[in-house]
Amino acid sequence: MAEKQVKAETMQATDVVERAKGFWAKYSKRIIIAGSAVIVLLGAYLGYKYFIKIPNEKKASEQIFPAEKLFGKMASTSSYNKDTVNMVMNGDKASGITGLLKIISSYGSTPSGNRAEYMVGACYLQLKQFDKAIKHLKEFDGNGADQIQSKAYLLLGHAYAEQKKTGDALSYYKKAGSISGLDEAMVTEALFIAGRYADAIGNTKEAIELFQKLKDNYPASQKVTSGEADRYLGKLGVTK
């Protein structure tokens, strides 16, 4: 009897993890596309802030531009083939592209090197090299660029989710929506992802709290007005 119970619990836990694994596939394109859209703004912000303080930034900025441009094109078209990702990360002399890994190695302390950490982390995530993705995404610092920092946290959540580290994944999904200064659309999207993930891993209490927070604090958001928040709350046993 005890053996059957253990087997049933093991199968249930496996099912929970399998249901949670779809998060990267579902949200990867939207998150990285949005991230690439603000990476240029991040470059302008950090370049202005640190250009005078860091002499190497001009050289780093010139070298990173081709790879950064290719990354943006790759993200906007959702065309993450291995050859293009490899070119972005390792460079291509014939095309005049300096790889982002070399930028990090040579100019890691500059704003360009910092931006490279984000893009390399995103690339490793596409390659399913999750430990490396986590390492580089954690090295990235938004330095006040709240939107891209939120995206980095979401990507970290995906990386941990794929490693089945559910506690770390949920923590980063929640952090993505807790940064002050985010616009409402980004906050509500992050809360919704966190709520869905909490539900997927069987953390009903956390899921209810997240969907309720979404509903109470952002009643005019698309996730609430469309009825999605109420639909998930209803699924979790919470009625209007």
Image (cartoon, rainbow, N blue to C red):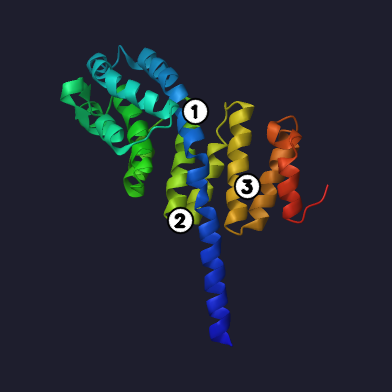
Q: Position of residue 99 (x, y in %)?
A: 23, 29
Query: Which disc is residue 34 wearing?
Result: 1
Name the mark nearer the viewer: 2 or 1.
1
What residue is rendered at 38% in x and 15% in y?
49
Side (left or right) of 224 relative to 33: right
Q: Residue furthest bottom?
A: 1
Q: Residue furthest left?
A: 93
Residue closest to the eye, 231 or 201: 231
Q: Residues within 10 Å of mark 3 (few under 14, many from 20)?
A: many
Q: Three-letter amino acid code at disc 2?
A: Lys
Q: Which residue is mark 3?
A: 195
Q: Three-letter amino acid code at disc 1?
A: Ala
Callout 3–callout 1 Cβ contact below 8 Å: no
In this view, 46 is above or below 195? above
Quarter in which the N terminus is drawn: bottom right
Query: Which disc is residue 165 wearing?
Result: 2
User: Spatial distance from mark 3 to mark 1, Cα to Cα?
Assistant: 20 Å
